[in-house]
Image (cartoon, grey):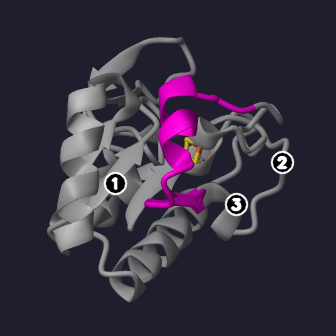
């Protein structure tokens, strides 16, 4: 199976109660290779919820205990991000998933970028916590921005052989 951020598949699980529906991924969803995951829902955070950002680093640094996460109201959400990431990894292992397609810029799912940690709309280079944990465990993670028809075909062919 290929893990996909649930919000990209149209699930209304985003912090503001909406989704990030991606038409290409939805079309390919019909082939039955995708497994929708939302780390922030798996950690029992509600929908909607205040936006959160990693403070003082990236997902990799948070995993190493050297950064924290906070929501816009000042609540420490570090443990929620860690719990969600661990649950997604458990699912990946149970399904022997080798690939994931996750939502760019999220503190959990970001692949190349995340928000700065200052709630100022700016982004920095780095991965979200779930992405960092999946990559650390040998899973190849792409963002929706890197997805093309060719890449989806390749991922699905590899998933059939897996
Ligand atoms: Fe989407 Fe990931 Fe945020 Fe869940 S945690 S809403 S899957 S970006």
Q: Quadrant of ligand 1?
A: top right
Report if residue 23 lies within the magenta region. Answer: yes
Residue furthest out toward the bottom: 94
Residue 61 visible in the displayed image: no
Whichever of labels 1 and 2 marks the residue nearer the N terminus, that label is 2
Horizontal arrangement in the rendering, residue 1 relative to residue 88 (left or right): left
Q: Given contact means CB atoms under 8 Å apart, are the residues at marks 1 and 2 in contact?
A: no
Of circles 1 and 2, the one toward us is 1
Residue position marked by numbered label 3 in the rendering:
41
Secondary-structure class at tag 2? loop
Viewer-nearest of discs 1 and 3: 1
How far apart are labels 1 and 2 at the CA level? 23 Å
Q: Is residue 83 magenta?
A: no
The disc label shown at residue 100, or none: 1
Q: Residues within 10 Å of mark 2 (few under 14, many from 20)?
A: some
59 lies left or right of 60: right
Looking at the rendered structure, the secondary structure element under dot 1 is: strand
Residue name at image x 47 percent, y 70 percent: 88
Q: Residue at x 45, y 66 (%)?
A: 85
Mark 3 crowdedness (10 Å alpha carbons): few <14, some 14-19, many ≥20: some
Q: Which contiguous range is marked in magenta?
A: 19-39
Residue at the top extreme, as displayed: 121
- Chain-order first, disc 1 or disc 3: 3
């Amino acid at each position: 199976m290929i893990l996909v951020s649930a919000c990209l598949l149209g699930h209304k699980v985003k912090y503001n109660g909406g989704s990030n529906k991606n038409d290409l991924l939805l079309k390919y969803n019909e082939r039955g290779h995708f497994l929708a995951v939302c780390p922030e829902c798996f950690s029992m955070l509600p929908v909607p919820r205040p936006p959160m950002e990693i403070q003082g680093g990236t997902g990799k640094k948070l995993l190493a205990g050297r950064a924290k996460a906070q929501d816009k109201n000042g609540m420490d959400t570090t443990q929620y991000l860690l719990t969600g990431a661990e649950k997604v990894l458990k699912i990946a292992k149970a399904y022997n998933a080798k690939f994931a397609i996750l939502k760019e810029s999220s503190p959990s799912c970001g692949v190349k970028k995340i928000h700065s940690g200052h709630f100022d709309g700016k982004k920095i280079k780095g991965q979200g916590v779930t992405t960092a944990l999946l990559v650390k465990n040998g899973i190849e993670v792409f963002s929706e921005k890197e997805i093309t028809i060719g890449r989806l075909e390749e991922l699905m062919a590899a998933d059939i052989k897996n």
